[in-house]
Every structure is written in structure tokens, then in C-alpha cells.
Amino acid sequence: MSEKETALLQRPAEPEHHGTEYLEAQFAQHDEAPAAEAPAVAEAQPEQPEDARLNSLSGEELAIELVNAIESKDTLRADKLNAIASHKIMEMVTDPSYDTKDADGEYETKLTNFHAIVQELLETNTDAPVETPAATVEETPEEQAERAALTSHFGNALQQFKIPEQADDIVVTAPEVASTTPEASTVELGVGAYVSFEGREGFVQDVFTNGSGDVMFEILDTSGELFFARKENVKDLDADEDDAEALVAAPLEATPVEAEVTDSSEVTEADAEKKSRVERVKDWFGKNKEAHKDKFSTAYWAARFSTAWNSMLDYRTNEDMSDAEIDRIRNINRKSFIIGSAAIGVLGLIGLGVSINESINADTAPVGNADGLGALAPDPNSLEATAAANAAAEAAQHAAEAEAATTALFDIPRGQGGLELFKNLGIDPSQWAANAPNFPSMFPNDFVAMDGGGVGIKHSGWISPEAQEFIKSLR
Amino acid sequence: MSEDDQLIAELEIQNLAPEAQQRVLDALRLQIGEALVSGFDEAQLAEYQAIIDNDTEVITKWLADNAPDYKNTVAYEQLSEGYDGDPESVSPDKVFAYMAWVEKNSPGLAETVARVKADVKANIDSYK
């Protein structure tokens, strides 16, 4: 670890913050040079034609491009090309069609080969830019012989780096099979079945018939979001054990409810719902609490500094920057990373129907009590402070909270479907099937007719008062 | 399934080596954060910086103003569990605030995360 990195790790809380002007400037810079310094493959900007061209280059062509970038001192481009090469090698050695028992070792070897080639190209080319490996001029016979040997070496090394082309070289993986094979889509499926639809996978939560007479599935996908699909369009992944065995094994644990499922044929709707939301939240924290707390541990950041492959903190830094500027950008990166981590965590909870800001928590407490789990662990001090003397006020408050909880059910969490909304409100699910087809025209700001023929809620958050009133009238 | 495992499945990068997976997830979190940060003003950024830097005064005030009953939530209950034995002693109030603040201050949170995820996935897919 460099002195600078050590200093950053040991630095106390930095009082300064970076305002929008600075960030906007950073974003502008980012726009001008997308992906150049991005950690590995991920880049939010749309791929540009130049990016597409670079991504399509062979290993040899990439090496030549990289040499040109280095010789023209274009650091950003060089970083980008290095990232592309690194990723392509990683993709190759981890591709199922590539026969290796040691992908990590193979990756290192090929990356070393690639860099050796680049280095040799740099050493054999004194004038930039390089057109081809054979572009050197005025060679002596000895130099020609050396280049011939070198070219041969390049050929062997680059052959190893050859990226598999299209489908001929690539084994179709289970997810692709699942999302593109329509056969067997109409086998007997029901609540609890593990299915896929247009690449999304999840468990069937409910089956109903829409206004057009189509049998519809309400499906909870592996990210916790609900969606609808016609029965005829979904694929039963449980039926394809050979193709999807490994794939199914992981999503079975997608949510705590599904984690208990071992035989979908035995699953009933009651089974799927037997775990309360409170338990789901507890499970979620059980699996993710340490990861979130880690974002504030010294060891976590020290590991990132000491891990050579991880350049996340150095995103958007370059050699021309001063140490102070690099530190400042690292701090922004750290802050953005933490905000992004928090955002993913928050959405994970919202996917379970829970807002972490639940003092505001209309969902959690009623569900916990209704499930007979008792009151959520209260803070003893808080209980003492509000005990007997405030009993009357407490009762009034509970009544208000109960009303607020009912009203709050119209504050739709991301991914909640209309059927779930009706159930939460205590409305017979058949009412949803009977009324939903009219909702997109009655309340176009709140409901949408989906491609699959179902009706979905158009947005998270509060639905319109008009829609609320109408739905309440169905109770 | 942990949050990371779920993201790996969503992005369909199960076949990548663990290091490469971690890089993608790091980049995803960083880019989601950047997308959200662009919607915050200076005061908000300063407040969040103070929270993640464990400024207890700011944390206490923010929680009192925005989530006064936070100690009665399942989330806080879970975060507090085992705190005494936590070698890093990361305050449960801080971890709660670090998430609650983002939820409270990011009106387009779900859409932003979905958009960045889709971009990242499209980018990954373009390499396949």
C-alpha cells in the first residue's frame, strides 16, 4: 500500500464535502470519456460506436491499439483498452466452452502474455503510432529475424487470447435455455411453481383469470418484485432439471419464503405466505447485515486498497492529478459507493414490502402482530419513558396508527402488484380479476395494461385519491 | 441468498471468477451512488457525509427528525443485535441512518437503480 493510500485509510472524518458544481464537472468529464477509467466492464453510459469497435477487436488488434495509446500518452484510452483486454480474457477462461480447470491461473497467464506482447511491441517500435506488428522500418537482417521470431511468438500467444466468436463457440447456458425455449410451457403449473418469463425467474404466487379469460400468474421474481404473465407464456423451470438444476438451486433461496421450498409440488399458497414479512426482514438482515456494516470497517477498505485488481476507489483518477485531487476523488468515490450500497439494501427491503424509515413503518408492525409474533423488540428506555403514565395517549396513538396503516397500504412499494394490494386491503382477490381490466382506462395515471395481457400498477408510491376511493368502495 | 448473490444472478455473471464478479458489483454500487448523488444538493451531501463519518450529533438529530420511532423497527432490532460483540463497533444508529437517509432523500430510487442495473447488464452482455 502506498503512503497516500495508508494516509487515506488513517485519515479522520473529512469535514469537507463536494458540492454539486464539482460533481457536475466530474460527470461532464465522465461523459467526455466514458468507460475509460471505469472499474472493469461496468459503465452506465450507452455504448458508443468506438466502444463497439474496440470491443470487437481481436487480441492482436487490441495489443496494437494499446501500444498506440501508450505511445501517444493517451492514458485514458490505454486504461480502457487494458480493461477491455482483461475482461475479454476473463470472459474467455470462464466461458463454459473453454476447457480449463484453473480459470484464475489461466487468466493470469493470458493477461501476462498479453502485457508481454504489448511490452515487446513497445520495445520494438520507437515511433508511434504503430500500424501493425510489421510496421517497423529500416530493419537490419538481425532485426528482421528477431521480429519474425517475435511475430511467431505473438501468433502463439494471441492465438490463446482468441475470443470465441458467436453461438458456435459458446455453450448455451441454463438461463438462456430457460428464457428462450417455449416448449413445455403449458404443463400443469400452479402456486409455488418455479417459472421463467422473458428472462425473469420466480415463484408463482397466485393464479387468476383476467377479464379476457386468460389464466394469469402473479410471480415473485428473485429480486423480490412481483409481475404478471399469461400462464401459456411462462416456462416451468422445475420440469427442466437437467438444464436448470444448478440455476434453480440458487434462486430457491431468493427470498426467505422460497428458501424453505424443496418440492414445488407440495407448495401451497399458504406455505408461500406462512413466513411473515417480519421474518423475511429478519432473514434479510441475517444475510446482509454484516455486508452493510462492513462498508464502515477499516478492514473492508484496507482490503480494497491492498487488492491489486480492485480499482474502484481510483475511478476517474489519473496520473496527472495531484495527490490532493486524487484523494478528493477517492472520497467522492467512497461516498458514492456507500450511497449505492445503501440504495441496493433499501430496495432489497422494499422488495419485502418494508420501508426502513418505518416510524413511517406502516407495514412492519401490523404484519408482525397479525402473525402472532408479538410486538417488535422495543427499546427498553423508550418503553420506560412511555409506560403507564401515557397509557391513554398510547391507545389513541394506536388507533391513529391503525388508520394510518390502512391508508398507507395505498403507498405502493416498488414491485407490488394489484392483487397484493387488494389482499392487503382485505378485498376479495376475485374483485381484482373483475375490475382490473378497466383500471388502465379509469385511472391511467395509476394502472397500465401490460404486454402479457395483465394489468399492473404503473408506479411505486401513492396511487391517486380517485383510485383509492374506488378501490375502497370494493371492500 | 445474499444481496451479492442475488445481484450476481440478476446480472447473469455467475460464470465470472469471484474477483471479476466483485469488480462488477463494486462498479454497480459506485454507479448507482453517482446517479443518486447527482440529485442531491450540497446540504444533503454534507449531511450524508456526516452520517457515514459517524458524526453522532448529526445522526441523532436526523433520526429524531425523520424516523423518531426507529428504535422500534425490525431493522434497528436486527442491526443492534450482537453490537456489543462487534469488534468494529459500527453503531446501529449509523447503519440505520445510512440506509434510511438514502431512502428518504431519493424519490426516484427504484427507477434509478433499475436503470443503472440495466445499463451495467447491457454493458456486460455486450462483451459476451
Image: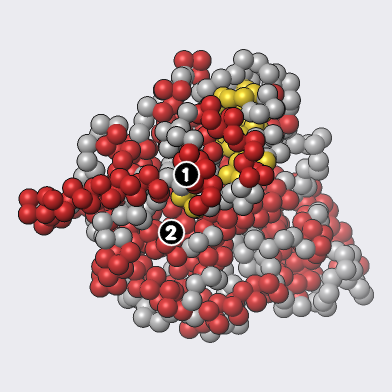
Residue highlighted by disc 1 = A351
Q: Residue at x 24, y 43 (%)?
A: A376
Is residue A51 depicted above or below A420 in this figure? Answer: below
Indicate the quadrant where residue B31 lies.
bottom right
Question: Is the Cβ of the residue at disc 1 closer than 8 Å to that at disc 2?
Answer: no
Q: Residue at x 33, y 44 (%)?
A: A364
Q: Residues within 10 Å of mark 1 (few under 14, many from 20)?
A: many
Tag 1: residue type?
Gly
**Res. A45 visible in picture:** yes
Cα–Cα span, label 1 and label 2: 13 Å
Residue A95: x and y, percent? 68, 39
Q: In the picture provided, is A117 more to the left or to the right than A13? A: right
Seen from the viewer's position, the closer of residues A449 and A96 is A449
Seen from the viewer's position, the closer of residues A466 and B60 is A466
Q: Residues within 10 Å of mark 2 (few under 14, many from 20)?
A: many
Residue highlighted by disc 2 = B103
Q: Secondary structure at mark 2?
A: helix
Q: Quadrant of the C terminus of chain A?
A: top left
Q: Quadrant of the N terminus of chain A?
A: bottom left
Residue A464: x and y, percent? 53, 52
Q: Secondary structure at mark 1?
A: helix
- Number of labels in the image equals 2
Seen from the viewer's position, the closer of residues A208 and A61 is A208
Is residue B34 depicted above or below A12 in this figure? Answer: above
Q: In the picture provided, is A214 more to the left or to the right than A260? A: right
